[in-house]
Amino acid sequence: MSGSIPMTERGLRQLQDELKNLTFVERPQVIAEIAKARSYGDLSENAEYAAAKERQNLVERRIRYIEERISRAQVVDLRMLSGNKVFFGAHVLLEEGEGEREVEYQIVGADEANIQEGRLSIEAPLAKALIGKEVGDFITLTIAQKKKEFLIKSVKYISDVDSCVNPSL
C-alpha cells in the first residue's frame, strides 16, 4: 500500500498505545498460552492450543496493520488550521433539517472514528460532502434512502494538545 493516511495527533497516539499494548502485553500472554497448551500433549486434538494459535494470528495481524498505518501516518497539526471552511480535523456544528436537531462532529481519520464520541471518518459520506464547504452552506445527502439536509452552523479547529489540557473542548 502507498499513500499517506491523515490522522490527528490523538489518532496517532491511540495507534501507538495499542501497538505498545499488543507488543508488550498481548503477544507475551499469547506465547505463554501456547506454551501452556503444548504441555497438555497431543496438539492435533488440543482445543486450547488451536485457540491460542488463532489468537496469536489475530494479534500479529493487528500489529502488522498498525505498524503499516503508523508508517504512512500524516499527522495534521490542527493548531495551524482556522477559518470557516471545513477541512480534515474540523469540529463542525450542523443543524439537521429545519431546526430538527443540532449535531457536532470532528472529521478524523478512519482509524480514530467513533460516531458515539462525535468523531466522523473522513471516508464517511457526510464528511466527504462537508469537505471544502463553509459556514452557512447547506449539504443535501441521501441516507437510508431519505434525503437529509444539513446547515453548517460553525466550524472550529481545536488542537488535540488543547483538548488534552481542557477536556471540555
Image (spheres, rainbow, N blue to C red):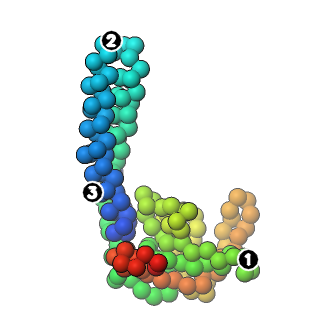
| Residue 166 image point, x, y percent | 40, 79
Q: Nearer the viewer, residue 143 or 79?
A: 79
Is the Cβ of the residue at disc 3 closer than 8 Å to that at disc 1?
A: no
Identify which residue is drawn at 30% across, 13% down: 41
* Image disc number at residue 6: none
Question: Amino acid under label 1?
Answer: Glu
Q: Secondary structure at mark 3?
A: helix
Q: CA distance from mark 1 to mark 2?
A: 64 Å
| Residue 23 image point, x, y percent | 26, 45
122 on left or right of 76: right
Tell me if I can see residue 159 in this picture. Answer: no
Identify which residue is drawn at 32% across, 63% down: 13
Residue corresponding to mark 1: 100
The local crowd at label 2, few if under 14, some if 14 to 19, many if 20 or more residues have their Cα within 10 Å, is few
| Residue 63 image point, x, y percent | 31, 45
Residue corresponding to mark 3: 71
Identify which residue is drawn at 37% across, 13% down: 44
Q: How many marks?
A: 3
Question: Amino acid under label 2?
Answer: Asp
Q: Where 20 sits versus 4, above or below?
A: above
Tell me if I can see residue 27 in this picture. Answer: yes
- Quarter of the rendering containing residue 69: bottom left
Question: Amino acid under label 3?
Answer: Ser
Is the Cβ of the residue at disc 1 closer than 8 Å to that at disc 2?
A: no
- Quarter of the rendering containing residue 11: bottom left
162 on left or right of 92: left
89 on left or right of 21: right
Residue corresponding to mark 2: 42
Between tags 3 and 1, which lies in front? 1
